[in-house]
Image (cartoon, rainbow, N blue to C red):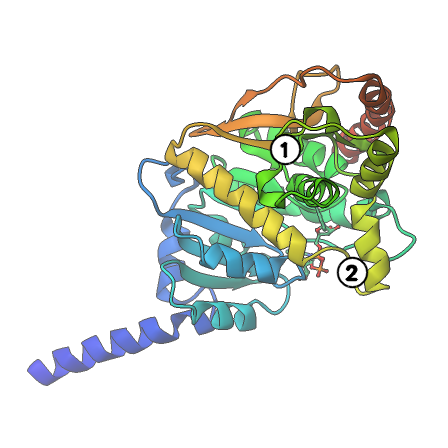
């Protein structure tokens, strides 16, 4: 009798040890997960230990992002979803001796289990640029991917904060909003386009010009996340500083074309992945600290907004328990920035419309 109990306990321990290797929906953790309902999603932030899903976790961004989120002490459960290779990535990441429990999910039939109960969903799924392509050239493939993933979010974790990385962000965020509106779950405070890489680049390049530690530099970047829609506000750099007109031209152009610099250097092997994973992990950490109730969390993000006449715009936002709690004003712009803003708005408006039409066609 006693021996039987010991054997059963040992078998249970063995099953636990091996559970991450087979993400099939038949194993006990998955069955338990599938019993959870969307309404049980916890996004209150009362206690540390959030549940985070990465969709596109086996990709160039997804893998290093999974590594960084596994290292984040605010994460208690990390779900890695992709249409390829998640068992390997999950086995690998799960060996890290940090707190988060990692589970892998492979392919569309496992999407719902990957999403159920999540507090934060990060989406780097989709194809990246090759030399000569604009972010908009990715629209046809990535729009459909983002739609499918957001339909899953609306069904399984409608209260989760959603961080959209897949390009063209200027259109994929409006696409996500339309999917959520159709499902009746849209909360503009919980849908955020990730433009952190533009800020990370701006801080680095401005730090280089000023001879400052880039960690001490803060450059607001507004507008959107493509070409001229990326508008660094060099008149509002913290610490306060001034630039010559040549420096302003050089810095603005380098920040706007930072992504293309990487695409060309990678020569067909993709776009920014490592700096992007760093930026996405930094932004996700800010969202989690907001959910936890930390005060004074301000980041730039592309969100539903009234700071201009456009329905979506990137600017500084204050993050809190319910996601975007406040959209901060743009502050005083100089003439160069006002001209840049008009150009940005023209392109942004078309990209937003393209995203909205994709869902409502
Ligand atoms: N927001 C930004 O600042 C920024 C910066 C760089 C790249 N990006 C974008 O991020 C995206 C990913 O880039 P990457 O370099 O990691 O590409 P990648 O091709 O290396 O990885 C993409 C991953 O998405 C997966 N995927 C494809 N369809 C999927 C689906 N339906 N469900 C789940 N996963 C799916 C792929 O299997 C792959 O593993 C691209 O759209 C790229 O343009 C955004």
The numbered mark at residue 301 is 1
Residue at image x 82%, y 35%? 252
State how far apart marks 2 and 1 are (Cα): 23 Å
Q: Quadrant of residue 187?
A: top right
Quadrant field for ligand 1: bottom right
- Quadrant of the drawing holding the N terminus: bottom left
Q: Describe the element under mark 1 as helix, strand or loop.
A: strand
In depth, the one of 117 and 305 nearer the eye is: 305
Instruction: Tell me where residue 180 appears, x and y as whole percent.
Output: 60, 32
Residue at image x 45%, y 45%? 118
Marked residue nearer the N-terminal end (2 or 1): 2
Disc 2: residue Cβ within 8 A of ligand 1's nearest atom: yes
Disc 1: residue Cβ within 8 A of ligand 1's nearest atom: no
User: Is 165 drawn above or below residue 16 in the view shown?
Assistant: above
Give the residue number, with chain letter if any, for mark 2. 270
Instruction: Tell me where residue 227 appears, x and y as whole percent.
Output: 84, 38
Task: Tell whether 192 sits left or right of 308.
Answer: left
The numbered mark at residue 237 is none
Instruction: Tell me where residue 308 appears, x and y as whole percent.
Output: 73, 16
In depth, the one of 90 and 132 nearer the eye is: 132
């Amino acid at each position: 009798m006693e021996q039987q109990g010991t054997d059963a306990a040992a078998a249970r321990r063995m099953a636990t040890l091996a559970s991450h290797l087979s993400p099939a929906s038949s194993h006990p953790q998955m069955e338990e997960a599938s019993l959870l309902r969307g309404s049980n999603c916890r996004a209150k932030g009362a206690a540390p230990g959030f549940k985070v899903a990465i969709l596109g976790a086996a990709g160039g961004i997804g893998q290093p992002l999974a590594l960084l989120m596994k290292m984040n002490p605010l994460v208690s459960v990390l779900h890695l979803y992709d249409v390829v290779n998640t068992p390997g990535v999950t086995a690998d990441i799960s060996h890290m001796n940090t707190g988060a429990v990692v589970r892998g999910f492979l392919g569309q039939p496992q999407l719902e289990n990957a999403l159920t109960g999540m507090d934060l969903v990060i989406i780097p799924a989709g194809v990246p640029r090759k030399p000569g392509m604009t972010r908009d050239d990715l629209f046809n493939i990535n729009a459909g991917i983002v739609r499918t993933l957001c339909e899953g979010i609306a069904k399984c974790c409608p209260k989760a904060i959603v961080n959209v990385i897949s390009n063209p962000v200027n259109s994929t965020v409006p696409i996500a909003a339309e999917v959520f509106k159709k499902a009746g779950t849209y909360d503009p405070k919980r849908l955020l386009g990730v433009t952190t890489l533009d800020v990370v680049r701006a801080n680095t390049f401005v730090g280089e010009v000023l001879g400052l530690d880039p960690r001490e530099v803060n450059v607001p970047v507004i507008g959107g996340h493509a070409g001229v829609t990326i508008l660094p506000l060099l008149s509002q750099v913290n610490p306060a500083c001034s630039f010559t007109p040549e420096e302003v031209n050089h810095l603005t152009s380098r920040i706007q074309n930072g992504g293309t610099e990487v695409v060309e250097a990678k020569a067909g092997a993709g776009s920014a992945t490592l700096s992007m994973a760093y930026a996405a992990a930094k932004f996700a950490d800010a969202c989690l600290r907001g959910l936890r109730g930390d005060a004074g969390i301000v980041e730039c993000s592309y969100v539903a907004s009234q700071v201009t006449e456009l329905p979506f715009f990137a600017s500084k936002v204050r993050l809190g328990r319910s996601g975007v709690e406040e959209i901060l004003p743009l502050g005083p712009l100089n003439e160069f920035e006002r001209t840049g803003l008009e150009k940005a708005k023209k392109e942004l408006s078309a990209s937003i419309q393209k995203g909205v039409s994709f869902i409502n066609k």
